[in-house]
Amino acid sequence: MNHSFNVEIAKIYGVDGAIIVENLYFWIAKNRANEKHYHDGQYWTYNSVNAFTVLFPYWSYKQIRRILDNLIKKGAINTGNYNKVGYDKTKWYGLSQHIFDVYHLGTSICPNGHTDSPKRAHPITQKGKPIPDINTNINTGIFKNPTIEEIKTYCHERKNKIDPEHFFDYQVSRGWILSNGKKMKCWKATIRTWEKNDKKTPQKQMYATFED
């Protein structure tokens, strides 16, 4: 895997800080493009320290905490909590306007043209299912929940009779866990299994019997 950083940001916050900022910037810019995770006047991304240790195996848990704390102290990043449930302690991160200026993104990252101060401890504000424990822009082999649009596209390509919304809602209700109790590894493989079972199982019973 390859990691990169912005030289101007490294001059201010050090190379370690610049590497973390690069990762956060990638996801916040992506969320902005997809109009996702907008809270309190700005776009956010999320991750746990444990997840960062997977992304950056050359740092220890304590080193990553130190780097993040330093970025927060210097005002490079903001933190918030927009998880659906109170027991989900995954932290959310936003970037300061100064960082966006370095990346030449101006104020367009915030639709209102400004960055509001983040609110902390909002345990019931995020819509949808609890967030996963990792968020990454590299291939780590960790399952990523598909969107309904991705499911629709795949079903359309295969010309099957699977109802994408039904498939999505069913898997969300199960936490993307297979009937054998194992975490799903490939949602496309599960759809192909649904296709096979659909041919031999009555429609009204099929959703209780599918396995990957």
Image: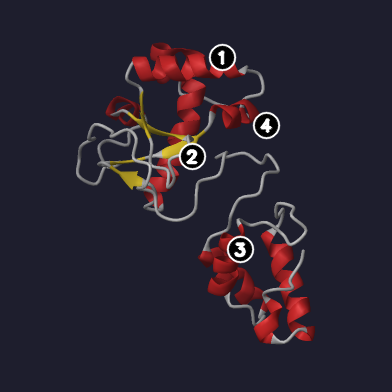
Label 3 or label 1, whichever lies nearer to me, is: 3
Which mark sits nearer the N-terminus, 4 or 3? 4
Q: Which residue is mark 2?
A: 88
Which callout, 4 or 1, points to the residue nearer the camera? Answer: 1
Q: Is residue 177 left or right of residue 21?
A: right
Q: Are marks 4 and 1 in contact (CB under 8 Å)?
A: no
| Residue that appears at 71% across and 57% down | 186
Labelled pair 1, 2 in contact (Cβ < 8 Å) = no
Q: Nearer the viewer, mark 2 or mark 4?
A: 2
Task: Decide which of tag 1 and tag 2 comes sooner along the chain.
Answer: 1
> Residue at label 4?
1
Which of the two labelled residues, at mark 2 and mark 3, occupies the earlier sequence position? Answer: 2
Q: Amino acid at mark 3?
A: Gln
Rendering coords of residue 173 (x, y %): 57, 62
**Amino acid at the residue labelled 4:** Met
The amino acid type found where label 1 is placed reads Gln
20 lies left or right of 54:
left
Question: Measured along the vertical axis of the image, is residue 13 above or below residue 135?
Answer: above
| Residue denoted by label 1 | 63
The three-letter amino acid code for the residue at tag 2 is Asp
Find disc 3 in the rendering and name its residue.
171
Crowd band around label 3 with a 10 angstrom C-alpha radius: few (<14), some (14–19), many (20+): some
* SS label for mark 1: helix
Label 2 Cα crowd, 10 Å radius (few <14 / some 14-19 / many 20+): some
Of badges 4 and 3, nearer the viewer stands 3
Report helix, strand or loop for mark 4. Answer: loop
Q: Quick one: label 2 or label 4, which is nearer the N terminus?
A: 4
Q: Which of the image's four quarters has the N terminus? A: top right
Q: Is residue 174 above or below residue 40?
A: below
